[in-house]
Image (cartoon, grey):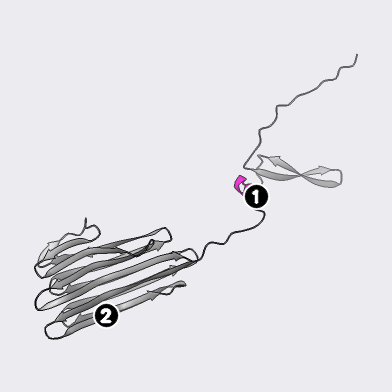
């Protein structure tokens, strides 16, 4: 009596990550078969890629266009004095066009505004990308003095924005306000120092819409009998809006 042996094989677990090809000789014809789990240089098909190819129908969705805006300046002064009003700046200044680009930069060396404010060196920059929806600006000053009330060796502001929001910060070294050294290590946004002749705001931040921000490193407001007005040091602006 002839016996027939039937061999059973446990099914191989499906391989989801590596699907390779290898040549198989069959006479003179060469065929290709899929071999799960075998590494072959130059060919790797991931599950995510298979899903995308299978469901997307070959189409693609372009990123939503955005308009960007921003800019920066080193110094601005608008002061009413007994002798005459003084309006200087903003200088140096850069502005980001709506289509983005850059970086756009400007700088100056040694500026003095009628004794009200002085800057040793100022550098500003701004840049943006409307395709991805991003903007960033910064302003940096060295050897700063304002209204005889504020002195600092370094004054910087910066901001960055995307469609989902914006953030900013300042850096100030060796700050002295009305003759008193001030530590800015823990100075949060809109830290205010009140003086008999006005006030000084450190890290002044103003929200501009849902995804825009203006940052002033130092904002001096004068409110005295002989002089009144505003002096702004190191301003950065940035914003992104979906179109």
Residue 11 placement (x, y as % from top left):
70, 29
Residue 88 in the image: state x and y as whole percent: 24, 81
Q: Residue at x 75, y 24 (%)?
A: 8
Question: Sequence-wise, which precedes: disc 2 or disc 1?
Answer: 1
Which element type, helix, strand or loop, lies under badge 2? strand
- Measuring 16% from the left and 80% from the top, which residue is drawn there? 80
Please tell me whether mark 1 sits on a helix, a strand or a loop.
helix
Quick check: is 162 in the magenta stretch?
no
Between residue 37 and residue 24, name the one nearer to us: 37
Q: Nearer the viewer, residue 206 or 138?
A: 206
Binning the other alpha carbons within 10 Å of mark 1 as few (below 14), some (14 to 19) or many (20 upward) gives few
Measured as percent of width and height from the top left, residue 163 is found at: 43, 61
Does residue 110 appear to the left or right of 44 in the view shown? left
> Image quadrant of residue 116?
bottom left
Task: Decide if residue 150 is on the left or right side of residue 39.
Answer: left
Q: Which residue is mark 1?
A: 55
Q: Is residue 52 above or below residue 151?
A: above
- Give above or below for 49 relative to 87: above
In the rendered view, does 52 fall on the left or right side of 222? right
**Residue at the outermost top position:** 1
Q: Residue at horizontal 25%, vertical 64%?
A: 204
The stretch in magenta equals: 41-57
Decide if residue 115 is in sight here: no
Where residue 216 sits, quadrant-wise, is bottom left
- In the picture, which quadrant includes the N terminus? top right
* Residue 84 can be seen in this image: yes
Whether 73 is drawn above or below 84: the answer is above
Q: Which residue is mark 2?
A: 89
Look at 40% across and 70% down and name the residue there.
69
Q: Position of residue 108 (x, y in %)?
A: 29, 79
């Amino acid at each position: 009596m002839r016996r027939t042996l039937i061999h059973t094989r446990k099914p191989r677990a499906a391989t989801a990550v590596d699907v390779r090809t290898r040549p198989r000789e069959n006479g003179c014809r060469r065929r290709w078969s899929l071999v799960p789990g075998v590494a072959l240089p130059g060919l790797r098909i991931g599950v995510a890629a298979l899903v995308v190819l299978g469901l997307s129908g070959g189409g693609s969705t372009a990123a939503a266009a955005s308009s960007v805006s921003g800019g920066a300046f080193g110094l601005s002064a608008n002061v009413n004095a007994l002798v005459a009003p003084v309006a200087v700046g903003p200088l140096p200044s850069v502005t980001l066009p709506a289509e983005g680009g850059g970086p756009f930069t400007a700088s100056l060396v040694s500026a003095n505004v009628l004794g009200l404010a002085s800057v040793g060196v100022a550098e500003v920059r701004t840049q943006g990308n409307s395709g991805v929806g991003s903007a960033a600006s910064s302003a940096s000053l060295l050897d700063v003095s304002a209204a005889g009330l504020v002195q600092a060796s370094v004054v910087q502001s910066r901001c960055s924005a995307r469609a989902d929001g914006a953030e900013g910060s300042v850096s100030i070294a060796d700050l002295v306000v009305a003759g008193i050294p001030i530590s800015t290590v823990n100075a949060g946004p809109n830290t205010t120092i009140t003086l008999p002749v006005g006030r000084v705001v450190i890290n002044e931040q103003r929200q501009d819409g849902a995804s825009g921000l203006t940052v002033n490193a130092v904002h001096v407001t004068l409110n005295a009998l002989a002089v009144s007005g505003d002096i702004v040091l190191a301003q950065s602006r940035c914003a992104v809006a979906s179109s």
